[in-house]
C-alpha cells in the first residue's frame, strides 16, 4: 500500500449494500445492479449521488498486481423506486455471490 | 497583403438575414467615400500594383493518386480550461477525496491552464506539497484563507512535467546496477519554491485561531454522517 496513508485510516466513502440485479418477478437483468446506500431513504436524496463512482472490492486466492484484493468499478446511474435505492452499472457485471455484500460509494466526481 | 490591424465591422446592421438597414446611397455616405474622394481631388485614390516577386517555376508533379481521396475537414477547436466551480476561489480550503493525500485539507492557490487546480498543504502543516489536483476529486469548503501575500505566477503545467529521462545505453552488465541509481532527489529549487509560497501562507493561517490544527487534521466520514446532508 502507499506509504502516505499509513497510520490514520480515513473513510471517504459511504457504505452501501448490494441488493441484487435489476429484475422483474421472473426475469433478471444482470447488467444493472441495485444498491442500497446507508442513510439514503428517498429518491430526492439520491440526486446528490448520481454519477458518483462505486467500487466492489473482493478477495481472491491468486495475487494480481501484488495484491489479493480486486475491485470492480462502477457508477451510480439513477434512483430505483421512491425509497433511496439506486441503480448502478459496473464495468463488468457484478457476480451473483456479491448479493448482500458491501460496496463503497465514493464522493467523487464531486460537485460541491 | 499585410494583415488588418482592426477587424472588419459592418456599418450596415442587418434587419434580417440578407436585408440591411441602409440603402446603397446611404451606405456610400456612411463609409465616407465622399470624404476620401474630396481629399483626393474628386477621384478615388488608386495605388499602383506592387511589383510581383518572380514566380518560382512549379515543377509538374510526378505522382498522381489513382483515386480522389476525401480530405477530412480541418479541426480548429481550442480546448478551454474546465469551468471552476463557484465554491472554489483562490484561498479556499479544499478537501482531497482521492489519492495519496485523501482526506487532507489543503489551500487552493490558482487554476492552471490545463484546468487542474494548484494546491499546497502548506507542506509544514500537513505534508502536502505544491501539487496539481483535478477539480472533480475535491470538495470546496466555505473556509477561506487570505493568500494575498503569495506569488504563484511562476507555477504552470510545465513546472510539474516529469524531468526528461536520460537514455540508458543498453549494456548487459550494467543493467542491474543502473536500476539502483534511479531514485531521484527533489531539486533544491523546488524545495525553495515550496518554502517561499508557504511562508506568506503560514502567516495568514496562524492569524486565524485553530485554522492550523484544522488544516493538519484529516477529514473522515464517521458513523451517521450523510454526505448528502452535510454542509461543507
Image: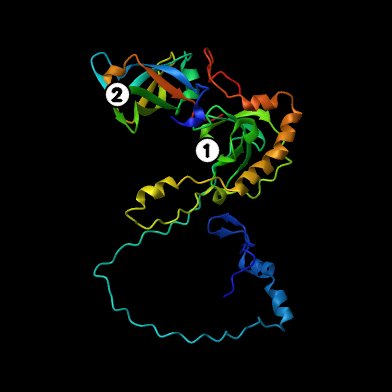
Residue in the picture at 57% in, 49% down: B159
Res B142 seen here: yes
Q: How many labels does the image show?
A: 2
Q: Is mark 1 on a helix, strand or loop?
A: loop
Residue in the picture at 51% in, 34% down: B136
- Mark nearest the camera among 1 and 2 is 2
Residue in the picture at 50% in, 51% down: B163
- Location of the C terminus of chain A by quadrant is top right
Res B98 seen here: no
Residue B147 x/y as whole percent: 71, 38
Residue A15 x/y as whole percent: 44, 17
Is residue B140 shown above or below A87? below
Along the horizontal axis of the image, is B133 left or right of B166? right
- Location of the N terminus of chain A by quadrant is top left
In the picture, the disc for residue B134 is 1
Chain letter of disc 2 in the image: A
Badge 1: residue crowd in 10 Å (few <14, some 14–19, many ≥20):
some
Between residues B195 and B173, which one lies in front from this camera angle?
B173
Residue in the picture at 36% in, 23% down: A57
Q: Mark 2 points at which residue?
A: A60
Between residues B75 and B113, which one lies in front from this camera angle?
B113
Q: Determine the CA span between mark 1 and mark 2.
A: 32 Å
Along the horizontal axis of the image, is B158 left or right of B143? left
Chain letter of disc 1 in the image: B
Q: What element carries label 2?
A: strand
Residue B125 quadrant? top right
Badge 2: residue crowd in 10 Å (few <14, some 14–19, many ≥20):
few
Along the horizontal axis of the image, is A62 left or right of B211? left
Is residue B130 shown above or below B144? below
Amino acid at each position: 500500500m502507499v506509504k502516505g496513508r499509513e497510520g490514520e485510516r480515513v473513510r471517504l466513502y459511504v457504505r452501501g449494500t448490494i441488493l441484487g440485479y435489476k429484475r422483474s418477478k421472473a426475469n433478471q437483468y444482470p447488467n444493472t445492479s441495485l444498491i442500497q446506500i446507508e442513510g439514503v431513504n428517498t429518491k430526492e436524496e439520491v440526486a446528490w449521488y448520481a454519477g458518483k463512482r462505486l467500487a466492489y472490492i473482493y478477495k481472491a486466492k491468486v495475487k494480481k498486481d501484488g495484491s489479493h484484493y480486486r475491485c470492480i468499478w462502477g457508477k451510480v446511474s439513477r434512483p430505483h423506486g421512491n425509497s433511496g435505492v439506486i441503480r448502478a452499472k459496473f464495468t463488468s457485471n457484478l457476480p451473483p455471490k456479491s448479493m448482500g455484500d458491501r460496496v463503497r460509494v465514493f464522493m467523487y466526481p464531486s460537485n460541491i | 497583403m499585410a494583415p488588418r490591424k482592426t477587424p472588419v465591422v459592418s456599418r450596415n446592421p442587418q434587419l434580417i438575414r440578407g436585408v440591411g438597414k441602409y440603402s446603397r446611397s446611404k451606405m456610400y455616405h456612411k463609409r465616407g467615400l465622399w470624404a476620401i474622394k474630396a481629399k483626393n481631388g474628386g477621384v478615388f485614390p488608386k495605388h499602383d500594383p506592387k511589383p510581383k516577386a518572380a514566380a518560382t517555376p512549379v515543377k509538374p508533379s510526378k505522382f498522381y493518386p489513382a483515386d480522389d481521396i476525401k480530405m477530412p475537414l480541418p479541426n480548429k477547436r481550442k480546448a478551454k480550461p474546465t469551468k471552476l466551480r463557484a465554491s472554489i476561489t483562490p484561498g479556499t480550503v479544499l478537501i482531497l477525496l482521492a489519492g495519496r493525500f485523501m482526506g487532507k485539507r489543503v489551500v487552493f492557490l490558482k487554476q492552471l491552464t490545463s484546468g487542474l487546480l494548484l494546491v499546497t498543504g502548506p507542506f509544514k502543516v500537513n505534508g502536502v506539497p505544491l501539487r496539481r489536483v483535478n477539480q472533480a476529486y475535491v470538495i470546496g469548503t466555505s473556509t477561506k484563507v487570505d493568500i494575498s501575500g503569495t506569488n504563484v505566477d511562476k507555477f504552470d503545467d510545465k513546472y510539474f512535467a516529469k524531468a526528461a529521462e536520460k537514455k540508458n545505453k543498453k549494456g548487459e552488465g550494467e543493467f542491474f546496477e543502473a536500476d539502483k541509481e534511479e531514485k531521484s532527489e527533489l531539486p533544491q529549487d523546488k524545495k525553495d519554491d515550496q518554502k517561499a509560497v508557504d511562508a506568506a501562507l503560514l502567516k495568514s493561517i496562524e492569524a486565524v485561531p485553530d485554522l492550523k490544527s484544522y488544516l493538519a487534521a484529516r477529514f473522515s466520514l464517521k458513523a451517521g454522517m450523510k454526505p448528502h446532508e452535510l454542509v461543507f
